[in-house]
Image (cartoon, grey):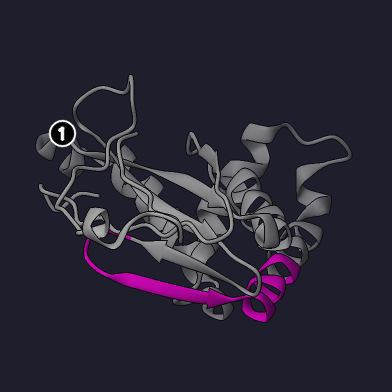
Amino acid sequence: MTFVLFNETTPAEARKEEKIEVRWSGAPPHVRPFLVECRNNLVRLHTGRGERVFPLDVLKREVAIVKQMREARSGELGPAPTRNQVWLMYKMQLPGEGRLFGSFTRFAHDIEVSNLSGENRRRQIERYPILLVYPDGLETYELVSFLLDSTTRLATGVEPMLQGWSLPYISKNGGG
């Protein structure tokens, strides 16, 4: 992953924002990350096409809904479902779950479905999350990690961040 971070001690002349490319180091060239800032009371999602914010209380409700979905299907899944069985259940249930419309969970689901679809294969672009975890964002990190691990099989990168660091990037290719 390539991006520039500034902190409060960086001289003003060095803080000039530059267009840089956000890339997952070592990944094939068709892989484009989306960045998820895990902050104190919110998650900020950088999609390359804009920014979305998910407050802590909204993420907590999402986790509760995802757990309810699994509990509601526990009889069908059996006493010890495999990860694949649970994943398939979420793939079938998420599109019809109105309570998750516009949610982080639905965004990640849609990205995963796009990565797997034939339409996306022609474009040769796959998107994966990189979680930028700030010291005050451990609770939001745990919630987002639960949602990603429970409902998707997206490979996820994690980058620890220091308080005061900002992320001044704009993707050159529109995929960051």
Q: Quadrant of the N terminus?
A: top left
Horizontal and vertical percent position of residue 25:
33, 25
Horizontal and vertical percent position of residue 132:
51, 50
User: Closest to the observer: 59 or 1?
Assistant: 1
Amino acid tagged 1:
Gln
Q: Quadrant of residue 2?
A: top left
Instruction: Write the residue at 58% across / 49% down.
Output: 148
Location of residue 56 with respect to 130 vertically, above or below:
below
Instruction: Write the residue at 37% across / 57% down.
Output: 167
* Image side of residue 167 versus residue 117, left or right: right
User: Closest to the observer: 93 or 9?
Assistant: 9
Location of residue 27 with respect to 160 vertically, above or below:
above
Q: Quadrant of residue 68?
A: bottom right
* Image side of residue 93 versus residue 124, left or right: right
Q: Secondary structure at mark 1?
A: loop
Instruction: Write the residue at 69% across / 62% down.
Output: 136
Location of residue 173 with respect to 66 vertically, above or below:
above
Residue receiving disc 1 = 124
Segment colored magenta: 47-64
User: Closest to the observer: 42 or 136?
Assistant: 136
Instruction: Write the residue at 61% across / 56% down.
Output: 144
Horizontal and vertical percent position of residue 127:
32, 43
* Image side of residue 146 versus residue 79, left or right: left
